[in-house]
């Protein structure tokens, strides 16, 4: 069935507008509690990022879950992958994340993990939506859920992150600039790298509820690039608001996106003897990664955009590495979901093993020019309209075998993403602008 609320990454929207309201989220908490509690698993873990609306939605979820007879473990501000980890280790029946990831503060969302720390299957999301259409029925007073706050949540997750690379690894002598986007990693990421011996220059670690992702973090790394050069740092690391994405910056201030980081991790895994024959990317993955992986004897499996589809392919084919250009990287041999801190640690470990700088490590992959333009839309759109498809066909004919065109509606924002990839920067940019213009005209008409 077609879902009414769940997108590729939970339920997301502008705060105060349906469904991102306190009333709906209370009902959502109740429905989730009803669907996911099972014999022996009667606790739900709830964490959030640093947006001001998180207080409201945390309380609403707590009330709804309690009404369903489910106990609640409150984590407070915590990276999304940290919530996934603690869902497993606290033996909860589910984990709930209050976050809109890389979006501005006025957006928020709710996403879920099953008790094994992975995204909920479609069938479970559909069952939750069925219950949302039914009246909320509170359990008997003696069966109401109780809430507790996990005071050592950050420390538990920090130790887990450090455990994903060899115990003898030391970052002593490495100078890092770490941009936490005033988000959920602000009190965790700097500690992880400092405890491993690095000299850390923190950025984006003063959240006020309104400044999450504001001109900082993985989606806006200009300030990080400048600071790395100003401080003569060895590299920079930037996370998004909920900590599941990461991009890195070399000592020259040059950005490495998720495709380049995935290549570095994959090559390092091969060097230490890991056995796998493919890496999972998406339709947006740069053609340059596909070429570089082929040179290593690896195939690139392309799936729909969204980390849940990357995960589905990893599990179906028993693979260990996958990710998106945005920096959402899944190291399934280390954890159960995309994790910005753990991905960064894998890259740092590869640097130490190779004795090379981050700049030199990325030299094994050459990115093809790629231009992405976001076209704002209102509601669902039909990209199969004749004018749009005719324009796409014309560009594809001109690019031939030396490029790609991709149009898709975002699962997290009200935009259509227009992507063109090819061998020449000027040609790619021109085609992308032309297609974006056609899409705007067709949608406005």
Image (cartoon, rainbow, N blue to C red):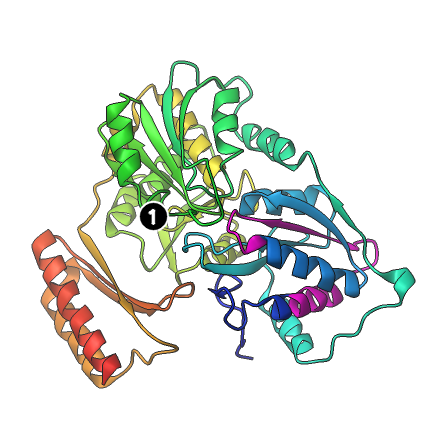
Question: How many marks overall?
Answer: 1
Q: Quadrant of the N terminus?
A: bottom right
- Residue at the (50%, 38%) spot, across then down: 185
Comparing 365 with 139, the one in front is 139
Q: Residue 117, position in %: x, y? A: 62, 49
- Residue at the (89%, 64%) spot, across then down: 141
Q: Is residue 18 above or below residue 235?
A: below
Residue that badge 1 annotates: 219
Which SS class for mark 1? loop
Residue furthest top as drawn: 173
Q: Residue 331, position in %: x, y? A: 49, 42
> Residue 344 lies in magenta, yes or no?
no
Q: Where are the magenta residues, as a range?
A: 26-54
Left or right: 13 in relation to 154: left
- Residue at the (52%, 50%) spot, across then down: 318
Residue 165 in sight in this render: yes
């Amino acid at each position: 069935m077609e879902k009414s609320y769940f997108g590729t990454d939970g339920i997301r929207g502008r705060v105060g507008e349906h469904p991102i309201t306190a009333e709906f989220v209370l009902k959502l908490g109740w429905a989730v509690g009803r669907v996911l509690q099972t014999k022996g698993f009667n606790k739900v873990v709830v964490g959030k990022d640093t947006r001001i609306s998180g207080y409201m939605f945390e309380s609403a979820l707590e009330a709804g879950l309690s009404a369903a007879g489910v106990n609640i473990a409150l984590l407070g501000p915590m990276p999304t992958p940290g919530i996934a980890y603690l869902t497993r280790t606290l033996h909860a029946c589910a984990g709930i994340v209050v976050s809109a990831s890389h979006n501005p503060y006025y957006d928020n969302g709710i996403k879920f993990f099953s008790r094994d720390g992975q995204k909920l299957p479609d069938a479970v999301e559909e069952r939750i939506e069925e219950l949302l259409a039914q009246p909320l029925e509170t359990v008997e007073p003696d069966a109401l859920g109780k809430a507790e706050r996990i005071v050592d949540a950050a420390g538990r997750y920090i130790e887990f992150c450090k455990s994903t690379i060899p115990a003898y690894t030391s970052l002593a002598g490495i100078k890092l600039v770490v941009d936490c986007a005033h988000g959920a990693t602000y009190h965790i990421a700097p500690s992880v790298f400092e405890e491993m011996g690095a000299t850390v220059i923190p950025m984006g670690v003063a959240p006020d509820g309104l400044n999450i992702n504001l001109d900082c973090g993985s989606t806006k790394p200009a300030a990080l690039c400048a600071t790395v050069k100003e401080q003569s740092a060895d590299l920079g690391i930037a996370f998004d608001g909920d900590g599941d994405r990461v991009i890195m910056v070399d000592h020259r201030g040059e950005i490495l996106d998720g495709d380049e980081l995935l290549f570095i991790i994959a090559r390092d895994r091969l060097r230490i003897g890991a056995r796998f024959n493919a890496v999972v990317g998406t339709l947006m993955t740069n053609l340059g990664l596909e070429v570089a992986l082929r040179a290593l004897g690896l195939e690139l499996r392309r799936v729909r955009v969204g980390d849940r589809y990357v995960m589905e392919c990893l599990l179906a084919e028993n693979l260990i590495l996958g990710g998106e250009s945005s920096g959402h990287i899944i190291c399934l041999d280390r954890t159960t979901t995309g994790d910005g801190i753990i991905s960064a640690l894998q890259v740092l470990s590869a640097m130490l093993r190779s004795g090379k700088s981050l700049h030199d490590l990325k030299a094994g992959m050459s990115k093809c020019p790629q231009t992405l333009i976001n076209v704002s839309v209102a509601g669902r759109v039909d990209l199969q309209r004749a004018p749009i498809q005719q324009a796409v066909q014309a560009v594809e004919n001109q690019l031939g075998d030396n490029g790609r065109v991709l149009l898709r509606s975002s699962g997290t924002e009200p935009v259509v993403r227009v992507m063109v990839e090819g061998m020449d920067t000027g040609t790619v940019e021109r085609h992308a602008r032309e297609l974006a213009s056609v899409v705007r005209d067709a949608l406005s008409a």
